[in-house]
Image (tube, rainbow, N blue to C red):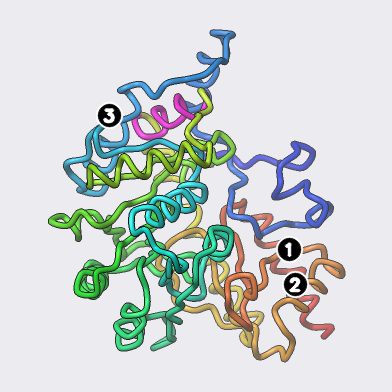
């Protein structure tokens, strides 16, 4: 059963960090719901053991990942020889960049092609690893973000790696199979390695289906997929993520890069939580998806009825809404700063994602928190 928790005073970044204190924080992408009961019970059993030393990854974790993606997403053929474990998806992306730098033996920076707006940590990974960004801006057509295929084709000729977010943060696009096949074809023809971040894979709204990139590139080996139960089951602080690598040589190279970056040691609680999430918590996840979609519908209707100057573009998944505020005539950074100061509501401005004129709103909270945040936003806008 889904249970909202007041997280204030629990030392969580979302509610208790300096910029969030005293606000209704609908910003950082984690959730305000207690983890599923099977996860908490598994962690309690591990706690009762009383010893929390260095851990190995047991076969149960590999089996849980393979079973979950097979039965829920029709992704077959995952086995232990394809999976690497690390602390989180962002460190995994940086380590993979390192492995590809070593693999390609390039003197010049590795060139990373990605869609913009993009998850802000993508920019950080690219910069921190000394890589070069090659951006392909998404375009708005019929109130939804779409790929500019001609530009993507052109930019692919200037890059070494295609960094994909599937589903896409922050726009909420759930890429269709046809779109993914077209992306794969472009990258194949221009010899780009594909790194697909699929941490939001469990969130697809009715009428939309997440398609694992690995089921598109089934005959290829020049790709890898990063996944984690962390986002879907609200266990990000337990630090456990997986990398699917079908290429044996690259598997060894990425494993070496994880060692170089020292992100191959795992939290024992993260390991038991992952198994319980994938093996026993599917009903909880279904309830969560319903709550997120209900919140999205409430946001859509609220904006339509109360704040029609704000435009909510079609969202297909994730628990993040991407709202256009350009009609207000102020930057998203100024909007967010003043909204936080004057009404104690915290959204993310679009500049951090490489965009302008938008805010990102986290919908993974209670209906009451969302409603109060929107009422405060309405009052703020009425006084502009």
Q: Of label 1 and label 2, which has the lower sequence position?
A: 2
Does residue 134 appear left or right of residue 298 in this picture?
left
Residue 148 spot, x, y in % from top left: 35, 85
| Whether label 1 touches label 2, CB < 8 Å | yes
Q: Is residue 288 above or below residue 223?
A: above
- Region in magenta: 269-279
User: Disc 3 marks which residue?
Assistant: 63
Q: Residue at x 49, y 52 (%)?
A: 94
By secondary structure, the bulk of the magenta-drawn segment is best described as helix
Task: Indicate the quadrant containing the C terminus: top left, top right, bottom left or bottom right.
Answer: bottom right
Between 291 and 331, which is closer to the camera in this rendering?
A: 331
Residue 20 spot, x, y in % from top left: 78, 55
The circle drawn on residue 237 is none
| Whether label 1 touches label 3, CB < 8 Å | no
- Mark 1 neighbour class, 10 Å CA radius: few under 14, some 14 to 19, many 20 or more: many
User: Disc 1 marks which residue?
Assistant: 346
Between 110 and 181, which is closer to the camera in this rendering?
A: 110
- 275 part of magenta stretch: yes
- Mark 3 neighbour class, 10 Å CA radius: few under 14, some 14 to 19, many 20 or more: some
- 106 part of magenta stretch: no
Residue 37 spot, x, y in % from top left: 50, 28
Q: Tell me if residue 1 can be seen.
A: no
Does residue 154 appear left or right of residue 184 in this picture?
right
CA distance separating discs 1 and 3:
40 Å
Q: Is residue 167 above or below residue 143?
A: above
Residue 41 spot, x, y in % from top left: 50, 20
Q: Of label 3 and label 2, which has the lower sequence position?
A: 3
* Furthest-left residue in this view: 219
User: Disc 2 marks which residue?
Assistant: 336
CA distance separating discs 3 and 2:
44 Å
């Amino acid at each position: 059963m889904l249970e909202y928790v007041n997280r204030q005073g629990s030392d969580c970044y979302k509610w208790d960090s300096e910029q969030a204190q005293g606000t209704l924080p609908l910003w950082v992408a984690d959730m305000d719901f207690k983890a599923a009961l099977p996860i908490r019970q598994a962690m309690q059993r591990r706690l009762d053991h009383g010893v929390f030393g260095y851990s190995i990854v047991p076969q149960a974790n590999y089996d849980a990942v393979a079973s979950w993606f097979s039965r829920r997403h029709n992704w077959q053929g995952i086995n232990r020889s394809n999976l690497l474990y690390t602390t989180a998806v962002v460190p995994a992306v940086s380590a993979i960049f390192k492995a590809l730098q070593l693999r390609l033996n390039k003197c010049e920076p590795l060139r990373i092609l990605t869609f913009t707006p993009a998850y802000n940590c993508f920019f950080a990974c690219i910069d921190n690893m000394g890589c070069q960004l090659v951006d392909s801006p998404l375009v708005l057509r019929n109130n939804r973000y779409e790929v500019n295929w001609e530009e993507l084709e052109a930019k692919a000729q200037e890059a070494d790696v295609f960094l994909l977010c599937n589903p896409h943060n922050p726009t909420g696009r759930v890429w269709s199979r046809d779109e993914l096949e077209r992306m794969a074809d472009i990258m194949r023809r221009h010899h780009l390695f594909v790194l697909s971040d699929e941490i939001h894979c469990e969130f697809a709204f009715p009428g939309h289906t997440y398609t694992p990139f690995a089921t598109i590139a089934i005959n290829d080996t020049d790709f890898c997929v990063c996944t984690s139960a962390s986002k879907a089951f609200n266990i990000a602080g337990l630090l456990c993520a997986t990398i699917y690598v079908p290429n044996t040589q690259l598997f060894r190279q990425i494993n070496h890069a994880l060692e170089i970056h020292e992100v191959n040691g795992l939290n024992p609680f993260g390991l038991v939580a992952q198994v319980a999430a994938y093996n026993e918590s599917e009903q909880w996840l279904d309830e969560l998806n319903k709550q997120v979609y209900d919140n999205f519908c409430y946001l859509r209707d609220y904006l339509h009825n109360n704040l029609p100057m704000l435009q909510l573009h079609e969202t297909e998944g994730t628990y993040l809404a991407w709202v256009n505020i350009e009609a207000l005539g102020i930057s998203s950074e100024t909007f967010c700063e003043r909204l936080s100061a004057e009404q104690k509501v915290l959204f993310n401005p679009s500049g951090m994602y490489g965009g302008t004129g938008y805010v990102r709103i986290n919908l993974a909270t209670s209906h009451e928190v969302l409603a109060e945040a929107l009422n405060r936003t309405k009052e703020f806008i009425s006084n502009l």
